[in-house]
Image (cartoon, rainbow, N blue to C red):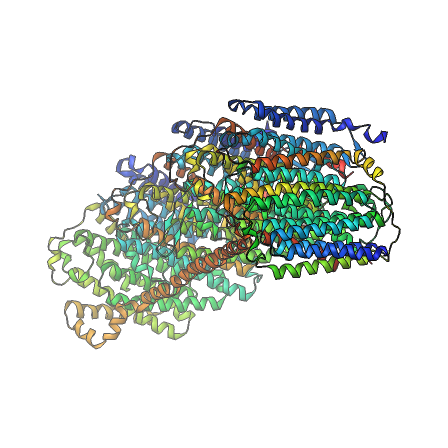
Amino acid sequence: MELAWLAPALNFAAFGVVSLFGKYLPGKGSFLSILAIFGGFILFGVVLADYLGQKEDTLSFSRTWVELGVARITWGMIIDPLSVIMLGIVSFVALLVQVYSLGYMAGQERFGWYFAAHSLFVAAMLTLVLADNLILLYIAWELVGLGSYLLIGFWYERPSAAEAAKKAFVTTRIGDVGLLIGILMLFKATGTFEMAGVFAAVEAGHVAPGALTWATILIFAGAMGKSAQFPLHVWLPDAMEGPTPVSALIHAATMVAAGVFLVARAFPLFEAAPDARMVVAVIGLITAGMGATMALVMTDLKRVLAYSTVSHLGFMMLALGAGSVPAAIFHLLAHAFSKALLFLGAGSVMHAMHDETDIRKMGGLRKKMPITALTFTIGALSLAGIPPLSGFFSKDEMLLAVFDGLSPAFLVLALVIVLFSALYMARLLFTVFYGASSPEAEHAHESPSVMTLPLIILAAGAAVVGFLALEVGGYEGFGNFITSGHHGFEVNLLLTVAAVVLALVGFGLGYAIYVRKALSTQALMGQFGWVHKLLVNKYYMDHAYQWAIDRIVLVFASFIGAFDRIVVNDMGVNGTAETVKRSGFRIRYLESGMVYNYALAMALGAAAVALFWWLVIPRIG
Amino acid sequence: MENLTANLYLLWPEFLLAGLAFVVLTADFFLPAERKNYLALVSILGLAALIIFTTAFLLNRNAALYGGLILIDRFSLLFKVTFLGLGILMVWSSADFVKRYLSHPGEYYAMVLFSILGMVVMASAGELLTAYIGLELLSFSLYVLVSHAREDLKSNEAGTKYILLGAFASALLLYGISMVYGVVVQVGIPAPTTFEAIATYVARVNSLPVSFLVGMALIIAGLGFKVAAVPFHMWTPDVYEGAPLPVTAYLAVGSKVAAFALILRLFAQAFLPAIEEWQTIIAILAAATMVLGNLVALAQRNIKRLLAYSSIGQVGYLLMGIAALSASASNALILHLVGYGVTNLAAFVAVIAFYNATGKDEVADFAGLADRNPFIAMALTVSLFSLAGLPIFAGFITKFYLFLAAAQADMLWLTGIAVFASLISLYYYLIVIRQMYVEEAQVKTPLSLSWVTGGLLGLLTLGTVLIGVYPKPLVDVIQTATKAILP
Amino acid sequence: MTPLVLFYIAGAFALGGAVGVVGTRNVVHAALFLLVALMGVAGIYLLLFAEFLALVQVLLYGGAIIIVVLFALMLTRLQEFSSGVMENKQWPIAALVSLGAFILISVAVARSQGGAITDRAGPGVLLLGESLFTQWAIPFEVASVLLLVALIGAIVIARSGEGEP
Amino acid sequence: MNDWLLFLLVAVPLVGGIALMFFPSRNYPLIRGYSAAVAGVSALLSVSIFFAYDYTAAGFQFTNSFQWLPVLGIQYSLGVDGISVLMVLLTGIVFITGVLISWNIEHRPKDFFVHYLLLVAGVYGVFVSQDLFFFFFFYELAVVPMYLLIAVWGSSTDFKTFLRTKEYGALKLMLYLVAGSLLVWVGILAVYVAGQGDSFAFSDLVSREFTPGFQRFFFPFFMVGFGVLAGLWPFHTWSPDGHVAAPTAVSMVHAGVLMKLGAYGILRSMELLPEGARDWMPALIGLGTVNVIYGAASAMSQKDLKYVVGYSSVSHMGYVLMGIATLDALGVGGAVLQMFSHGVMTALFFAVVGVIYHNAHTRDIDVLQGLAKRVSVTTALFVIAGLTSLGLPGLSGFVAELLVFIGLFRTYPILGAIGVIGAAITAVYILRLLAKVFFGPISERWQHLHDASPVESVAAGALATVLIAVGMLPSYFVRVINSGVLPFLERLTGA
Amino acid sequence: MITLVHVQVLSAGLFCIGLYGVLARRNAVLVLLAIELMLNAVNVNLVGIAAFVDHSKFLGQIIAVFVITVAAAEVGLALAIILRLYRNKGTTNVDQLNLMKW
């Protein structure tokens, strides 16, 4: 498993080669990218096997990056359960998505560039999960953002895509400011960037509690940005402007999960700073709630999925806030499969519908694209928490964690959100695939096998990974694996039943509304008009940001700009110059041309010299 | 009286110079019109020969003739050579002007030679009256030269202003001399108007009497007029503008260098012991001169007036050297004088070349010069940059040295003002440069440049750069000169 | 008639003439007033044992300079000089400055000469001449060149144009 | 041979420039080829000096000295340490790329290259001079050609609310820089006089004792004087205006190298007056912070590409100043690396903007739109520069800024946090710029826009490569910097 | 008894009257005459000093001789120049000499 570093390295290499020489290669170099990620996946296998055999955290490699004066920044890669799992998720999903993309992106302009950027993203993501060091983590963190930026903006000719890419980068960047400041604060306190060193120092109580809390919250700010937590979630739905496979990989399965990963990775800090953990929980809950409610009313296929992602990420954060890393990571895993599946399914639908994304124009696609419909259904059910699909297990774990770790209010709200999750999944599923066939869907057809194959594989995954939670035979279960044996599988029957019931109710309600039309959506909208409006307008968050940017940031900037030009430049600089010049023009009129004036000046000058000499200069005697 | 005339031979260079002037003057009567340009050649060759002769003859001689009236030393030698060289340049730069406008060039060249004689006397004078006579000789020649364009109203006006104010200034100067004489003579020092006697007096009394101060103030006024120090400068722009261009160049360089040679010797050999008393005064004059000169230059539209004010500004820097008087300051002052001389001449010759080709002398007329004659533009740019004190030109090192000397005399505040003033100067130099390089010319025809003027311009430009790049030989020579007046 | 009285008389001529020079509105009168002042000054020279100078004063100034001035005035149109205001606008300031200068110089002079010095005597013309041609030979010769320059200059400038500018 | 490397380094462009004056004006290929050859030789020299520099030995190397004016104790002595050698490398890189970018200058190319070569000679001179006089000499020499370079070959722009002519920009820049240098001049004179008045050599002067009062009084002369050139707020306005007016290569050298000269000067003067410097560092760091935020905010409000880049330089130089002022090995080292990184980055920026302007004849952000569709190379290069600017890891800017931030957090954590926020603001305006200019639908007007020519692509590509290389493998650079910074700090803090 | 102060005050008086003339008169010839007054004042001063305090007794007179010489020459040259001006411009008033100013 010393070879783990090869996984990101291969993909970086692929990025370099494909971006520079892609256009001269067959298939624009796409095969290189796929080979690279396949290599990554193989390495995952090797590493996993090694790790299971050895059961010890190890450094893959470690080297000095920068050494200056007293400080030294080294970096390396660490192999521990968390990184192994993430390595697996990332390489597996990425592999499938890239294969899928071969079909989905076929014929696109900049086909090679797409794969290059993909490789860049994957490489960065793999570095991120393997990093043993906060600086390397930050580096990868930023590069992941870059990959996301490039891929969201892949169709940069569309203003909306360019705008979305920018928004994503800027918004996450705001979180990153916090992350970097947090890292630097920790460095100041502990003198190292090594995570192990930092955690050790924290556990030993070398860091003042106040500073630690702030540093931790700031680190969480980074996670908020990447994982689209309230109030920095606004970029994620817009990010759907990118190609759908990108949404599947980055904005569902991997990058957005990085925040969750970060909190999990830095969990010793959160354990030492309960206030910060509370913040995580509250933010997670709010995010989950907002995401779920907005998902209920969106009409864009991908946006519904996006808000669903937001909601689920909030859930994971909630679990982390409740103190359970295994639950959160397990949900991350389950969600990765399910959501990637859903997105790829959505992509398949769009592929068939000529890039139509409005769900109101869809319907009855089940018959046209059976594989897609089936796999999509599995994904949806999984996320809704219907047993025995993976989502059920993970959600159950999370609820249990909330029950254990936080006050009952959190649990109640979480259960409500579970209901909503099921409801919007049902809405999506039924509207798109069931019911009457819409006119636009007349000519839809099933996607090629290069696309459906990943769907099937993912569906299988989404269906079965839940069982990883169970302790079977020699396998000690996911929780124990990730915590090295501290967290076994538990079930609280009452809670499980409640959750399942709520999920089923939600689904049932959805069936009633969208298939049976038992409840008129129009009527509901009429009754709760303001709620609907609020939700459709995304709680006016985008408006608020827009307002803040237009009215505060840009106004401030133009104020500074104008200040610089008018006050500093025109008044300060030019003003001084002008004054000097004017005084020159004034004094010049002393030179009157009259001889007697000149003589007078001379006489006065001589007299002044004499008088000054006589009277002013201090003289002895 | 045997001992008085014994070493009269040491004045051979002066006699020969006077002789040369007479030759040129009289030869004019005999030469046919088309041969008159030989006079320039004769003058130049004569001066060149004199330079060689003077250098060889006086190199290792030191003497004080007539009880200190005339001093033969390295200081005077350096300036003699400088003035003779200046004479060559002056004659050279006038060649085109003379050829075009004058029917009796002999008078003109003779005046130039006489004025050089005056300068030489000034630089070697060790006594107030002798210095005064030398000064007047120079002034008279200049009055004539300034009025030489007889039918030009501006020249008439300039001549009138110059001679009236010049006479007024010499009255002030003389009155000052008389008062200093009156004070020094009372303590019974022999030959009381020699610099040596004054120095003895100044060193002896612990507080200068008021009448001495008044006398000195008047001397400063008289000499200040000559070098155009504020507030005695006001004639400068008018006279510079009115005078024929080569004469303006000569005024700006020759009379100033000569006056500074005199001032330097006077202050170093006569007034130095009382430096505490006059330092501040001179420093204030210097500050006023450089600030005012450069400020008003900002407002000028005529290149001659602009250069006039710029040269007033330069005088301010030079006065710093007097205010900070020390061996180092003297070195710096002389170096700056030489550097300034070469640079300013280069600037003027460039303007002359332009004027000869176009007959115009407004700054705006220089538009597009870089296209019409890149060489003139380049030379003018180089000299302006040098005047502004930018490397690799002479002005940089000379100014650096000068300011350094002021700083060494604990007058950093003055250095600060000087630095500010040179910043202002850069502004108006840039305006000229901008005209030449950036603005489009109204008339785009290329300008011709006679090889005579062109050669001179090239020489001066080269000199500007050479001094800027490797001043060591020059500084070495100057140091020996300084040693003569400030042992 | 003590020397002091004579001094006052000569001084009165000198100052009176001088005031006339700067006060009169007629240029010819001014020239004549100058003559008066010069004669007064010559008288003072005599009182101060400078016989030679007194002579030079009378001959050179009284004779030559005044003649030259008058000659010049004749060459220009006289009415130009004899009419109108002869003072410029700054004459009040000029008066103030002159008065101030007078006070300044007088005070300076009075302060530095502590008491009357009465030791007066004069050199003979012979000594003066000898000194002029030996010790002061060089300035003298330079002065002669200077006169030549003035002469040539005056000719060059006054000469009527030959098509020269 | 090694002794003469630095001498050659300065002499090659200087003599090359003077020799070029005598070339025929019309033979464009000859002039271009010759200039490129001179630049190439000089770039090779700087690269070889950089890699020949022995960082394990540290100290000044390749030293050489000639008497120039012994009366004043002026000698032409040369040498580089770990800090200046990096600057030499930077100059070499920007020099050659600047020549290549100016390949298509059609207006009096000879004069242009003469001035350009002299400019670069001055810059080299400053970095290798070990004598205060020559330091100042070259400093001014670098300023001299600036005026004509901008006023003749620059461009005027009419913004709707105000006009910025090239003459204005040139004049302002020149006066400002000279004003700064004059302050320095006063400082130099004071130091010389106070330090026994017999030598201008750095090595002599640093061993002289200056009273704390003297140091406190005169350090600001250096700080502000050099600060002007480094774009220190509020003396920065020459920089954006100058850049807007300047031709591409000049903007490159200018923002890329000349502004570094200012920061370098501050570093050197700190060595000269260590106690005074220590007392003034809080002021410097404060102004540096203002630079960062103010520059970034101004950049955000600009409508002209060059203004954006110009103000971004102001902002980035703020990091340099802040880093220097930390007096922390990481902070100062980061500042030096930032000098290098920003130099290359901003050169790349200006190169690309120049290409765009050359082809599109406008730099108006509101007019340019969707260029990526047509000009992929230009876009890629601009994106790389932009990403460096916003501190993206993997590019040199990140390493430098990170080090600065670490240094700041060790000394002034609050300002460090503000600095990090500044980097985020940078991201905002850079990304807005990218979105507006390069992305989005391409307008009809730019359908036939030309991409960068091969020569331009090679030049800018080289710069981009340097950015990436340093970003990926900063350790060599950091080691060299380290060898210069440690003795520096030892001198300064007595540590 | 005549004292040096007497002489010098007289000289100062002459000088200042001359000064007034230079400063207040508008005709070039009159200005010239006033300058002559100032030069005479110088001479009075010199002669007085020579008579009262100079042991060699004659230095002041020597200087005075030179002053007279120079003054005479100056008047001649100045008048020539003024005449030339008059011929070209038709006036000798200095306040009409304003072709060049500022």
Q: Give the quarter of the image for residue A297.
A: bottom left
Please indicate, yes or no, whether residue B323 appears anywhere in the rendered image.
no
A493, C69: nearer the viewer = C69
Q: Residue D112 placed where, x, y %?
A: 44, 36
Please indicate, yes or no, whether residue B121 appears anywhere in the rendered image.
yes
Please state if A485 lies on the left or on the right of A149 as rendered: right
Asked if D490 appears above or below D411 in the picture, the reply is: above
Q: How many marks?
A: 0
Please state if B199 lies on the left or on the right of B331 as rendered: right
Q: Which residue shows up at 42% across the image and 58% down it? A: A561
A180, B404: nearer the viewer = B404
Q: Residue D5 placed where, x, y %?
A: 57, 30
Asked if A224 appears above or below B67 in the picture, the reply is: below
Q: Which residue shows up at 38% across the image and 72% down it? A: A410
C83, A530: nearer the viewer = C83
Q: Residue D67 placed where, x, y %?
A: 67, 32
Q: Residue furthest right?
A: C119
Q: Quadrant of the N terminus of chain D?
A: top right
B213, C46: nearer the viewer = C46
Q: Residue D339 placed where, x, y %?
A: 51, 46
Please state if A181 lies on the left or on the right of D450 as rendered: right
